[in-house]
Amino acid sequence: MKEISSKDFSVFFGDDVFEDMAQKIIENEYSKVFVLVDENTEHDCYPILKNYLVNVIVIRIESGEQNKTLKTVEYIWKQLQDNFADRKALFINLGGGVISDLGGFCAATYKRGIDFINVPTTLLAMVDASIGGKQGFDIDSHKNMVGVFAHPKNIYMYPKFLETLPLNEKKCGVAELSKHALIKNKSLWEEMLGKSILDDKSINELIQKSAKIKIKIVKKDPLEKGLRKILNFGHSIGHAIETWSLKNDTNPLKHGEAVAIGMLCEAYISHKLLGLTNEELHQIVAFVEKNYTYYDSQWDEKELIVFMHNDKKNLNGKFNLTLLKKIGKAKIDMDCSSELISESLSFYQNLKHNFPTQHSA
Ligand SMILES: NC(=O)c1ccc[n+]([C@@H]2O[C@H](COP(=O)([O-])OP(=O)(O)OC[C@H]3O[C@@H](n4cnc5c(N)ncnc54)[C@H](O)[C@@H]3O)[C@@H](O)[C@H]2O)c1
Ligand SMILES: [Zn+2]
């Protein structure tokens, strides 16, 4: 087992992490243990986790971003109340980012906060969502509009959970993984370009490197006053596209897929405003083309820009984008014109024929 410590919590990684988790649960003398799952993590992951738990109550919600809502939050709070969760109860988030965002929020607010731990089961949650203490939910498909900062006690990453994760979900994790490399670590980016990322051995190493980047950033700026904003690269345009897709498509884009498009567009803006070189831009373009399907949406650009104005990252009507000066170096709080955002969206659309396949919306 590998341990990566931070100030407020530790991340444990390996095939034997649950022995340590079970030991800590016993030491803390929790009154009850609640495990939040969706139908997939209940089926594929809970049978392993349950061997390490006693006195446990499972709360199941339906999978999908569409359920990251106040209604689900209320359902979870009610399950805690109906099952007499007291302030010594422990809450375990067993799932991807939707589970840890929702469950972390519920635990951090129920009776003014009970202990919770994250057991991420998607690549995206291992490299990103389970770390950093941000949790919350969407309002009317607008991303993460309500939330709190609160850290889990610990995070347990059991890489074998990735064996049942579908390929398209793994690729969502690759988006956040590449984001960490692009904003902070050029050699990690080059490593990602040079190898088959999703091989078992590569992925285990990449998860740990990527998680370390996020932990380091969050440690320096836990409340996102400055530095932490670099993690938002790809997420201003990405979140607007995700919201559009959630509102308009029967098979909406996943978060990681929308972020991949957002990174491509924001790399284009970085090229125009900050001198990201043509070669660097085209490395990013080629990476997105290789790993993702093309999203052929008839999106309304004006509406996307309205969604961006509504983004919680913005202040005083400015966009506050995170852009790249070069690969491995990001710059926060960058404003740009609506015209340049439109231009970046057209840049993406003009690449349509370079993608091998299309997303069926
Ligand atoms: N809080 C943060 O810092 C942060 C950071 C990044 C992303 N996020 C949020 O994370 C969410 C996306 O997370 P995600 O991509 O993990 O999505 P997700 O939680 O929806 O999981 C994706 C799908 O995989 C299934 N699944 C999960 N683990 C599985 C397994 N081991 N085997 C088989 N199926 C499995 C789930 O049931 C779901 O259908 C978004 O809401 C995003 O906003 C939060
Ligand atoms: Zn993200």
Image (cartoon, grey):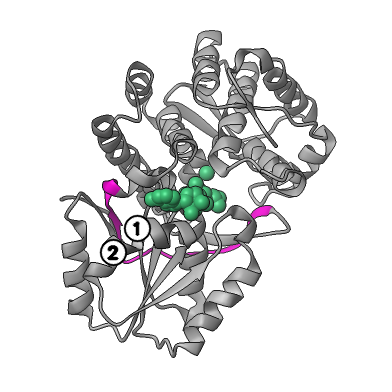
Q: Is label 1's Cβ within 8 Å of ligand 1?
A: yes
Residue type at tag 1: Cys
- Residue 40 lies in what quarter of the image? bottom left
Q: Residue 259: x, y in percent?
A: 57, 36
333 w.r.t. 17: above or below: above
Q: Nearer the viewer, residue 177 or 40?
A: 40
Quote the CA–CA distance across marks 1 and 2. 7 Å
Residue 45 bears which disc, if any?
Answer: 1
Q: Is residue 121 visible?
A: yes
- Residue 12 lies in what quarter of the image? bottom left
Q: Element under label 1?
A: loop
Q: Is mark 1 in CB contact (under 8 Å) with mark 2?
A: yes
Q: Nearer the viewer, residue 43 or 128?
A: 43
Q: Which residue is mark 2?
A: 49
Q: Considering the image in quadrants, where does the C terminus appear?
A: top right
109 w.r.t. 254: above or below: below
56 w.r.t. 201: above or below: below
Looking at the rendering, the stretch of residues picked out in magenta corresponds to: 142-160
Callout 1: few (<14), some (14-19), or many (20+) C-alpha neighbours within 10 Å? many
